[in-house]
Image (cartoon, rainbow, N blue to C red):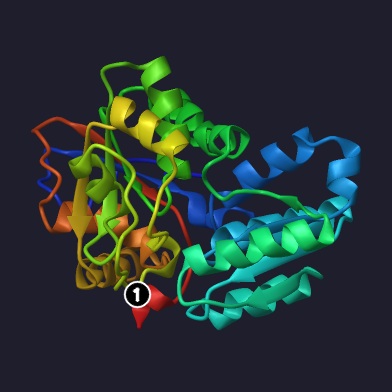
Amino acid sequence: MWLAEPVKQSPVQPSVALWMKLELLQATGSFKARGAFNKALALPTEDLQRGLITASGGNHGLAVGYVGSLLKVPTTICLPTNVNPDKAEKLKSYGAKVSIEGATWLDSNKNALEIAEAEGLTYIHPFADPLVAAGQGTIALEILQQVPQIDTILVAIGGGGLITGIATAAKAIKPSIRIIGIEPVGAQTLKASLDAGEVVTLPKISTAAVTLAAGRTDVFNFDIIRQHVDEVVIVSDDDMRHAARWLWSEFAIAAELSGAASAAALFNSSVKVKSGENVCALICGAGRDGLA
């Protein structure tokens, strides 16, 4: 899902070709259905039929709820208290059971694991699962099939599943490609872990970009990101709002804050680009919070 050609009203110098991968046009409004379907369809029938459960800032939950509605299996989605209310209502329209508890994804995940054990449900991790990450990695296959001259891919990071899949696939196809992750100032989950040389839990999360506020990655993701991601840069919430308004005013693209993070990293110049470079910004999620 692309704009058909490079963006003319680019936030970087005209000599740089900016392409946008519009994953906000996917079912449920983000890339997350890729990973959720890949995982669910690989499950043994008995595991699938007893019901699925996950914890999410919103988008992965929507994907699992959507998958459950199509495969006709029950789903339970655990969300933090700061979830976008529209996403919670959409989940209910899919027939999902919604449990809202805790201030962060880490709290919601604890809730999900407890319910899964008590009720015998099949838990799907939003990022620390090879099949989920592989599903997200299909984005890289499409990018390099459609525009093989791409030099750099910009990817927002929450828990790390998206960039894990994209970096693995992209580097396998084109080892010279640059993969750059983007995190909010108030949720530097991977940056803090990379700086420490090990997975760390953030003591505090302070960002309005709820879907980027995991607070802790997993060793599975960390090891792959450390090996295949070239750099992780930081953007502020205001940077993301500015980028979201640009996407809306120029292209009528309604991106949530996380969806605008890749463009924000170009606007605030945290990503350094060269003349003649082909850059792909992944617009990963739809929403109205970026326009508030």
User: Please, what is the three-letter code of the amino acid marked with disc 1?
Assistant: Ala
Residue 168 drawn at (x, y percent): 43, 26
Which residue does the image show at 76% across and 33% down from the upper left? 42
Which residue does the image show at 85% across and 50% down from the upper left? 71
* 229 sits to left or right of 128: left
* 74 sits to left or right of 277: right
Which residue does the image show at 12% across and 50% down from the upper left? 270
Q: Which residue is mark 1?
A: 208
What secondary structure is marked by label 1? loop
Image-quadrant location for residue 38 = top right
Residue 172 drawn at (x, y percent): 41, 16
Residue 180 drawn at (x, y percent): 26, 39
Tell me if residue 126 comes above or below residue 98 in the rendering: above
Q: Using the image as rendered, state which of residue 218 and residue 9 is in the foreground.
A: 218
Image-quadrant location for residue 14 = top left
Please say whether residue 104 is visible from this viewpoint.
yes
Tell me if residue 283 comes above or below residue 254 in the rendering: above
